[in-house]
Amino acid sequence: MHRRPEVIFFVLALVFGLANIYYLPPFQSPDESNHFHRTAHITQGYMMGFEEDQRLGGMLEKEYLDYSLCFDRIRKSDNNSFNQKDFVNAKRLDDKDKIFVDFANVGYYSPSVYFPQVIGLWISKIFRVSVFHQLYVGRFAGYLFWLIVVFWSIKLIPTQKYLWVFLALLPASISINSSLSGDVVSNALAFFAIAWSLSKMQKNEGISILESLIVTLCLSVIAINKPVYFPLVFMLVLISKQQFVRPLFKWLMILLPVALMLIWIPYSHDLFIPFDLYNSDYRLNQQLNPGVNPAQQLEFILSNPFYFAKIALLSYLDSAPATWAHYIGKFGWEKNYISSQMIALLSFMLLALTFVKEQGVHIRQKKKWKLAVIALLMLGAFTVSIYMQWSPVGNEQVWSLSGRYFIPIFPLLFLAAPSFKWDKRVVIERISIVLIALANMSLIYEIIQRYY
């Protein structure tokens, strides 16, 4: 077991991911209905959503909208559960008339956010799979991509492999990455970018032109998918320029993703329609907040940098317990968590894997500081972005500090933490695998209890 952590990850992730895909009812993950509609829209050849009558979305068969409406009431209820009739009705949907469907908060995302799910839906349409099952095919396609990329990341990373396994298998990670979410591709590629960079840094190996192209593509996709994670390009700073075929390649690999991001942001955000300007007949069902205006919010931040820093700090302090619980054990939408006792156990184990040094390769302290700086840059970019998109202008709190947004950020902080030697680390590693398996069993149990 000690020699092949990536195999352990693959087996556990496959078992619990498939169970989550099957048992979590349709559209019970954050924004899953909008992500599904956007994915279906892309399969029709549209790269972006379009504006019509002060709405952002696209033309889709009516059955797609009816499908999400079948299950919408459960998301908004703390007590109701599904019954067989909900699924029977959804499976009978077959209305091919096209209507305009809103996906206001995802219509301006890069289409690369969805490419594995788009492939899944495209194949399912070729084989005339029903709209009901297309969601499950899309979930599986995205999860398969995440599974393969993270498996390879664990294989690549030269240190803290069991920490990497543990983070990837956290119940909240399994839950969000096995749903049809816009976070799946970015989460997977972030794990890969970190692991690949550390591998090259520690092994001092040469980097081929093909490798350079692949990693540049990955970093570019991350930068346009989730611009707040663009500081991951600075992982390349940790690698010696002598390892590249040409020293210039290192700087091109950094500058190209940043340049693409700077081009993409103005283009994509021109499509965003704030709540106050959105068609009043449809805006209440969209994930938009009143009073939000990104341009005005940015002006407020730049005009009041110290006040904004205070707002951000107090917001993080206030939301820290919920953010951490969300990062460890959140599933579905609204207030659904695994037990607080299991979250506490997972938290202690995560600290043990972080602070107890493993045998073999270690990251030097100087480079740990650089990892921490990269993580803080990501944290700062995320804080500004989420405040612009979710909080009213000048609001005294940063809203929506959900733990799932920190999946690409926290691993760098764990890697940057100081550690000490203990000869029994292998015991911690073995216990961590047993505990994470039990935690995911708890996840499936809680899903069944909540929804059935």
Image: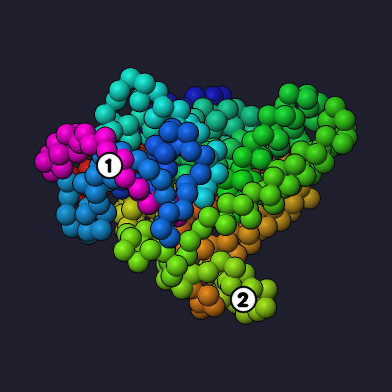
Displayed quadrant of residue 447 = top left
Tell me the number on the disc at residue 62: 1
| Image depth: mark 2 or mark 1 in front | 1
Relative image position of residue 230 (x, y in whole percent):
66, 49
Query: Is 287 covered by the magenta stretch?
Result: no
2 or 1: tag closer to the N-terminus: 1
Q: Is residue 214 left or right of residue 167?
A: right
Residue placed most toward the observer, 234 or 69: 69
Residue sitting at 54 percent across and 24 percent down?
A: 4
Residue placed most toward the observer, 319 or 369: 319
Real-space CA distance between mark 2 and mark 1, rounded to the nearest whole angstrom:
41 Å
Q: Is residue 315 left or right of residue 39?
A: right
Vertically, is 404 above or below 46? below
Vertically, is 54 above or below 233? below
Relative image position of residue 326 (x, y in whole percent):
42, 55
Relative image position of residue 387 (x, y in whole percent):
54, 67
Q: Is residue 30 visible?
A: no
Q: Residues within 10 Å of mark 2 (few under 14, many from 20)?
A: some
Tell me the number on the disc at residue 410: none
Query: Is 86 covered by the magenta stretch?
Result: yes
Give the residue number, with chain letter if any, for mark 2: 300
Residue sitting at 41 percent across and 45 percent down?
A: 58
Q: Quadrant of the C terminus?
A: top left
Amino acid at circle 2: Phe
Residue sitting at 88 percent across and 35 percent down?
A: 247
Q: Is residue 131 visible?
A: yes
Q: Is residue 185 left or right of residue 420?
A: left
Determine whether the residue tagged by mark 1 lies in a helix, strand or loop. Answer: helix
Q: What's drawn in magenta, residue-wise? A: 83-107
